[in-house]
Image (cartoon, rainbow, N blue to C red):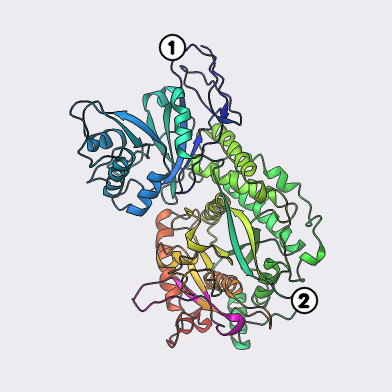
């Protein structure tokens, strides 16, 4: 059997909609199904094929994409359905006598008005639009219709599982299959693949507007960077409350050791850099060992990193406050100084390679994330298909890094301006971090708190975050700007704080010190009775600096400290059912710690430290 060389120009990942197409990586980057052997080479270029095989023998290419894991649910909403359809390529189908559009949707995609109403209505509307039909009924036998190639749904709601180390006979037996990218309790996306005739490949590319990468660049807005001088950090706690926190942590015997992860513009100093390096190594060893993932091609790079931030100017490191992360460390110092036993660890992860020596951290996290998504491993059990998955994961990591050099190659961030600073990051990195942190917490039974002291307008990042993690996500509500709707971060759809009112997988943090003046804080309107997962806390760190950027990590640390003291130690590994229950309990606990004062939103949602240690987690 001969092999076919394919030269691909252009790239296979659609813009927007959270739907991404790529050529499937398995043992090879691209597979042309010429009988059973693998046979393809992929190179950069414009979507075209150079065939060396006999024309009489048709070849197929396997394309794959990520899609929302709930796209086949009857509750999948219409707006997301339209977004998914608009970002899909299309192909032509020819109607036979007696065929209807509804019948074709049922036959080809398992879409029907009863199983998947949102997808059905949106597909009908799109097909009518693409073919300039008067209605869905105005079709005739033999007519060729342009139809979007959307994910195939399954009426029962279950997925068609398939191993990572599949055989080609399995692929040939099913023209369109799917596999979940993570265990059911954390899956937010799944991978679907389908066969495309090599002769049709160029039309798929040209109709979808493809671009490179499984990820995509995002730009986040940090808080205002003002003076660079060092000042004494203003404590957010009165002395008696500070002593209460100190005593509770000192006497804690729960065995829980929570981890607060601050994801921001940089790592503040050499000490924090070493802690981050040690944490990445620990996380990797826990995940790979307990999930049976074998060796990582990137962990060696992490181990070989120096013990200091090399080539980093001292004036960009704490205690100088030019960098946003240094200001956050400054804001946390009055709290972390109360924890002599370091029962609550604080780890800093940068949004991008703004310092030398951090890119290997990203590669290791991305690699672990891809391995977990592909293998769906269970603790203590040997995973099947590890070798194939490792090769695939390494290829994906290199593709992500190559497609977004601005984020993954060293490039120092600008600092010291009076305006708000911004940092480019990567959506794939953020998703990978949430997955890796949940895996770590699941396996060690130590919860994590992810602190995001930055904003993005209008929900620009279609992130699929881990569902019901063993941890919290805290997002700054913003400082009264960039929402597009005044200071209402929910109406302005400010990322990620607005999720506190919808998916409720994020705790939005307000600044109880503001307004007026530099302490302005975004708020929201709860007059309609909307339930928002939110807390407010002091955001002032000195006379010149104040904002939700500093309220957010403080709340993350305090909630983590409460769980360390009052939480119930869960058995490791933490089960999906236990995580769902824990998340439900945490929402109740967050509500119970709010102030009873109701003169304003900032007071009503203010975190009352007197209540912090009152309730023990059931």
- Residue at disc 2, secondary structure: loop
Q: Nearer the viewer, mark 2 or mark 1?
A: 1
Does 419 sit above or below residue 395?
below
Where are the magenta residues, as a range?
510-535
Q: Earlier in the sequence, mark 2 or mark 1?
A: 1
The residue drawn where x is 73% and y is 53% is 411
Residue 531 covered by magenta stretch = yes
Can residue 447 be spotted in the picture? yes
Can residue 29 be spotted in the picture? no
Quarter of the rendering occupied by the C terminus: bottom left
The residue drawn where x is 59% and y is 81% is 519
Which mark is drawn over residue 56?
A: 1
In the picture of the structure, the residue carrying the numbered disc 2 is: 229
- Across and down, in percent, residue 600 comes to 45, 85
The residue drawn where x is 55% and y is 55% is 437
Q: Alpha carbon of mark 2 to alpha carbon of mark 1: how far? A: 74 Å
- Residue at disc 1, secondary structure: loop
- Across and down, in percent, residue 33 comes to 47, 21
For this orientation, the residue located farthest to the left is 98
Q: Nearer the viewer, residue 22 or 190?
A: 22
Is 103 placed left or right of 598 in the picture? left
- Across and down, in percent, residue 567 comes to 49, 69
Is 439 placed left or right of 172 in the picture? right
Which mark is drawn over residue 327?
A: none
Question: Crowding near pointer 1: few (<14 within 10 Å), some, many (20+)?
Answer: few
Q: Nearer the viewer, residue 566 or 475?
A: 475
Residue 124 covered by magenta stretch = no
Most common secondary structure along the magenta stretch: loop
């Amino acid at each position: 059997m001969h092999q076919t060389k394919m030269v691909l120009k252009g790239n296979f990942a659609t813009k927007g909609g959270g739907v991404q197409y790529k050529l499937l990586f398995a043992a090879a980057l691209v597979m042309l199904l010429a009988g059973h052997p693998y046979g393809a080479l992929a190179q950069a270029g414009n979507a075209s094929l150079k065939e060396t095989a006999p024309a009489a023998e048709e070849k197929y290419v396997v394309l794959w994409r990520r899609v929302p894991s709930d796209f086949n649910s009857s509750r999948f909403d219409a707006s997301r359905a339209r977004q998914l359809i608009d970002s899909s390529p299309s192909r032509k189908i020819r109607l036979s006598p007696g065929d209807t559009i509804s019948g074709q949707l049922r036959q080809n995609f398992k879409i029907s008005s009863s199983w998947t109403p949102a997808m059905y209505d949106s597909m009908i509307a799109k097909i009518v639009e693409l073919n300039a039909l008067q209605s869905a009924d105005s079709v005739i036998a033999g007519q060729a219709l342009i139809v979007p190639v959307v994910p195939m749904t399954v009426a029962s709601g279950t997925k068609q599982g398939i191993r990572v180390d599949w055989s080609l006979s399995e692929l040939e037996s099913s023209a369109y299959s799917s596999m979940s990218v993570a265990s059911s309790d954390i899956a937010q996306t799944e991978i679907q693949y389908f066969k495309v005739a090599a002769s049709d490949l160029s039309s798929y590319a040209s109709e979808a507007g493809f671009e490179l990468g499984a990820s995509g660049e995002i730009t986040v807005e940090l808080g205002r960077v003002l003076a660079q001088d060092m000042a004494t950090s203003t404590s957010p706690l009165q002395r008696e409350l500070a002593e209460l926190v100190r005593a509770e942590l000192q006497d804690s015997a729960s065995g829980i050791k929570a981890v607060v992860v601050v994801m921001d513009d940089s790592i503040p100093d050499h000490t924090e850099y070493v802690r981050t390096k040690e944490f990445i190594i620990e996380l990797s060893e826990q995940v790979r060992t307990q999930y049976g993932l074998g060796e990582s091609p990137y962990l060696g790079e992490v181990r070989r990193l120096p013990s200091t931030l090399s080539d980093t100017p001292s004036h960009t490191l704490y205690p100088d406050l030019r960098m946003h992360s240094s200001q956050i460390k400054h804001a946390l110092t009055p709290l972390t100084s109360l924890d002599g036993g370091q029962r609550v660890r604080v780890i800093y992860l940068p949004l991008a390679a703004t310092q030398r020596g951090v890119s290997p951290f990203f590669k290791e996290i991305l690699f672990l994330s891809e391995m977990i998504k592909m293998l769906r491993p269970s603790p203590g059990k040997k995973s099947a298909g590890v070798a194939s998955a490792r090769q695939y994961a390494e290829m994906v990591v290199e593709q992500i890094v190559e497609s977004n050099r601005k984020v993954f190659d060293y490039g120092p961030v600008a600092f010291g301006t009076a305006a708000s600073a911004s940092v480019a990051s990567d959506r794939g990195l953020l998703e990978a971090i949430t997955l890796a942190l949940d895996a770590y917490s699941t396996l060690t039974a130590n919860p994590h708190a992810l602190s995001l002291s930055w904003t993005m307008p209008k929900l620009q990042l279609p992130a699929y975050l881990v569902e019901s993690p063993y941890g919290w996500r805290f997002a700054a509500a913003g400082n009264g700007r960039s929402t597009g709707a005044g200071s209402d971060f929910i109406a302005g759809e400010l990322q990620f704080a607005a999720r506190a009112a919808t998916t409720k997988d994020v705790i939005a943090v307000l600044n109880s010190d503001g307004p007026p003046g530099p302490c302005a804080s975004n708020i929201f309107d709860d007059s309609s009775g909307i339930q928002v997962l939110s807390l407010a806390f002091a955001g002032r760190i000195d006379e010149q600096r104040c904002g939700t950027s500093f309220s957010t990590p403080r709340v993350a640390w305090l909630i983590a400290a409460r769980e360390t003291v009052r939480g119930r130690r869960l058995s490791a590994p933490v089960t999906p059912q236990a995580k769902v229950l824990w998340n439900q309990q945490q929402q109740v606990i967050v509500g119970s710690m709010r102030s009873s004062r109701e003169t304003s939103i900032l007071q009503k949602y203010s975190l009352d430290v007197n209540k912090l240690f009152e309730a023990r987690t059931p």
